[in-house]
Image: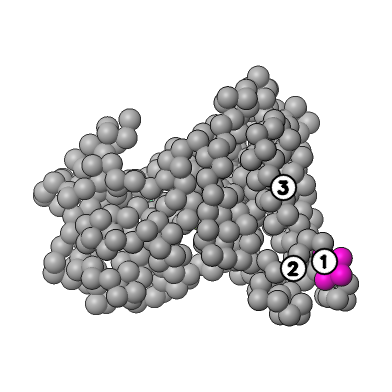
Amino acid sequence: MSEAVAETVAARFGELYGAEPHGVWAAPGRVNLIGEHTDYNDGFVMPFALPHIAVAAVSRREDGVLRLHSADVEGGVAELRLDDLSPESDKNWTAYPAGVVWALREAGHAVSGADIHLSSTVPSGAGLSSSAALEVVVALALNDLFSLGLRGWQLARLCQRAENVYVGAPVGIMDQTASACCEAGHALFLDTRDLSQKQIPFDLAAEGLRLLVVDTQVKHSHSEGEYGKRRAGCEKGAALLGVNALRDVPYGDLDAALSRLGDEEEVRRLVRHIVTENERVERVVSLLESGDDTRAIAPILVEGHASLRDDFRISCPELDLVVDTALASGALGARMTGGGFGGSAIVLTEETDVDAITKAVTEAFAAAGFTTPRVFEAVPSAGARRLR
Ligand code: ADP
Ligand code: MG
């Protein structure tokens, strides 16, 4: 399948730029199984890659010019001069790939220009990391074409810098690392403090299980206020508790930490979410590693959703409706996933209940007057790679 996709994207590159591309690369979107908003608190996350990918056909140039085109947005080829790239100068989609080139050059890597054509099947703004897929596919292509020798986690760091500084979105390191480093059939247990990673086998089909993604079609935007406010609140909590990051508050010390925060009610809630969420990731990892029934993780997903809804306060009526309806229709577990305020939820279910749950969620959305959600099955897929 990816051969055919590579062929199509390469052919379009030829039409746009008048030559064959030097290569074609792919990088996936992701869903996060557990570990939400922990990544900018030096904590734990556990994403896996989706089969949905951003594909880039790319040729190198030597003349300091960067040309960018996306099949998925209106408009022609954007032409930029590398020497003119500067953070937050660009508010278009081109900021994502241009930001990666900027970050590579800032870090001293000799990138002298490129022609890039992109095409992506990762839904945009659905909490499935279309932005990271775009960044990582460009970073991987340039890493190969300019023989930079960077590893996946190093590319992820540069992509995060591009998104933080050049795009201006204060995101953590999870999405880029997931896109760069995930492996098919596995979830990625990532310690965001040092980027140490462990691939955890996650084969739901073998146990008669399915993981559904329900895209509520409510668009979120990370660069706007609320995400930054949560981040600032977590930093305030760490400062009040005298730790580098909330990761450093042990689960066993949570009650003591909360009482030390006195009447800082909002900070208390944020701290409680982060500390309990890190513990939930550790519980999920140990359950999956024990080789026991994967169904055992389901209640932890539900706890995670309650914490995001009540303590971190980043759910929304559509996400809550997915979770409540799915659980009422026989799902084993469900939670919102990604940054929140819209985007997607995940539902862990018996294979035999997929149709009933899909129907119930779709009907509940219609009854509530919400836009029809998009439901699909998430199979843990490969991370970023060269297609040709
Ligand atoms: P998410 O990463 O959850 O999908 P973001 O807001 O972080 O949401 O990123 C979405 C943005 O990424 C879009 O608004 C657009 O600027 C850019 N983007 C995503 N996919 C594409 C694409 N195929 N072509 C061009 N730009 C894209
Ligand atoms: Mg994003």
- Mark 3 or mark 1: whose residue is earlier in sequence: 1
Quarter of the image that includes the N terminus = top left
Q: Residue furthest left?
A: 18
Question: Residue at position x 77%, y 47% from top?
Answer: 303
The residue under label 3 is 283
Marks 3 and 2 in Cβ contact (< 8 Å): no
Work out how far the residue at label 1 is from the one at label 2, CA to CA, in angstroms. 7 Å
- Mark 3 or mark 2: whose residue is earlier in sequence: 2
Q: Nearer the viewer, residue 326 or 275?
A: 275
Could you tell me the amino acid type at mark 2?
Val
Quarter of the image that includes the C terminus = top left
Above or below, 110 relative to 18: below
Q: Main secondary structure of the magenta part?
A: helix
Left or right: 61 in relation to 366? left
Could you tell me the amino acid type at mark 3?
Arg
Q: Residue furthest top?
A: 352
Tell me where residue 14 sits by quadrant.
top left
Mark 3 burial class by Cα count in 10 Å: few <14, some 14-19, many 20+: some
The residue under label 1 is 253
Where is residue 377 shown, x and y percent of the image? 55, 32
**Residue 249, numbered label:** 2
Where is residue 134 shown, x and y percent of the image? 38, 54
Mark 1 C-beta to ligand 2 under 8 Å: no
Marks 3 and 1 in Cβ contact (< 8 Å): no
Above or below, 209 relative to 304: above
Left or right: 251 in relation to 22? right
Above or below, 287 relative to 100: above
Question: Residue at position x 32%, y 69% from top?
Answer: 104
Question: Residue at position x 21%, y 57% from top?
Answer: 145
- Tell me the magenta residue range: 253-257
**Residue 6, numbered label:** none
